[in-house]
Amino acid sequence: MKVIETKAGLKSWVNKRKAEGLTLGFVPTMGFLHEGHLSLIRQAKTENGAVIVSVFVNPAQFGPGEDFDRYPRDLPKDIRLAESAGADAFFAPSPKEMYPSEIGAVIRAGRQAERLCGKSRPGHFDGVLKVVTKLFHLTGADRAYFGQKDAQQLAIIEKFVQDYDFPVTIRRGATVREEDGLAKSSRNIYLSDRERMEAPALYEALKLGREAVLEGRDPVPAVRRHIENNTSGTIDYVEFLSYPELQEKPEGTAVLAVAVQFGKARLIDNLLLHLKENPHASNDAEF
Ligand code: PAF
């Protein structure tokens, strides 16, 4: 696996692979890789001739007072893990390399960013779109891989790519969970021992919410109650919205999404439900 730190180095590697006729899969990450990332890398490897993984903690998507400075970082371990999962190139640029000068035009996420994390973290998805635009151009990827755990991010990027005719196909990866149901996340490291014991309640709550939907009830109260009764965290949101539009009164596919602030860790999780079919059929292993 080739470790690359500059845009010029990446371009030259990409050009060589394209000249060899290989298709390119791309897995963008902010590092501190876990099984969720590795499953995306493996998926990319089965669908492409070569795979690029990027690790870049993108300052543009963190708001004031958020965890940019303390976001967990372990590049040597990430390099080992990415290689073991089958990556061919590992792009880890510095902020200066990515953003050498002030950007002259802004990209602003639209309606899909008005609720959920977009509401709690103003400007977050603008920053995500800024960096993925650059990364899509730099990698020239045929396919890019994003996890369902960040369902709002995935919906926004899919629409952005479609609206602006980016020549890349977005591929979805199922949420990977710990044995007790906690969704894998780089931010789980912030949890205290007690919070770690409580955190599986998010997924339990979502599953109770799914039962409520099956019985024709609003799932939000059941989800809230379970989280409030079983964790010390503070609920940021529990919402039941159409997917991927992320608007009220879902009819076809819906997302039931939660965000909970524990001491240092803000955890998110969600379930997608196909309302016209049997919502049981739509667990998070199939999208
Ligand atoms: O999901 C993430 O880790 C980030 O938002 C992404 C897509 C790598 C952009 O910085």
Image: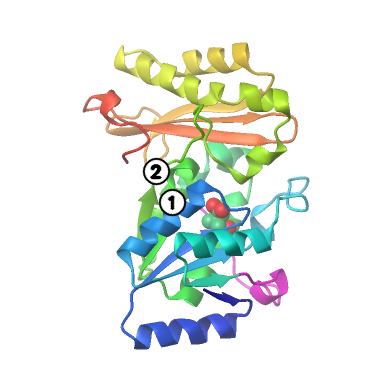
Decide: is 202 above or below 215: below
Q: On the rendered image, what quadrant is the C terminus found in?
A: top left
Q: Measured from the top left, where is residue 160 in percent x and y?
A: 42, 58
Kind of residue at disc 2: Ala
Task: Left or right? Give the position of 232 relative to 241.
Answer: right
Res. 53 in view: yes
Decide: is 124 above or below 28: above
Circle 2: element type? loop
Kind of residue at disc 1: Ser
The span from disc 1 to disc 2 (Cα, nearest Å) is 9 Å
Task: Left or right? Give the position of 58 relative to 221.
Answer: right
Decide: is 66 above or below 142: above
Q: Quadrant of residue 90?
A: bottom right
Q: Measured from the top left, where is residue 155 in percent x and y?
A: 41, 48
Q: Quadrant of residue 259?
A: top right
For the point 61% across and 14% down, the residue is: 230
Q: Measured from the top left, where is residue 214 in percent x and y?
A: 30, 16
Task: Left or right? Give the position of 94 relative to 185.
Answer: right
Q: Give the range drawn in magenta.
A: 92-110
Mark 1: is the Cβ under 8 angstroms from ligand 1? Answer: no
Q: Are marks 1 and 2 in contact (CB under 8 Å)?
A: yes
Q: Mark 1 points at which residue?
A: 39
For the point 60% across and 26% down, the residue is: 199
For the point 44% across and 65% down, the residue is: 26
Decide: is 9 above or below 54: below
Q: Which mark, residue 174?
A: 2
Q: Which of marks 1 and 2 is nearer the N terminus?
A: 1
Query: Badge 1: few (under 14), some or many (20 or more) residues near its Cα, within 10 Å?
Result: some
Query: Quick check: is 109 in the magenta stretch?
Result: yes
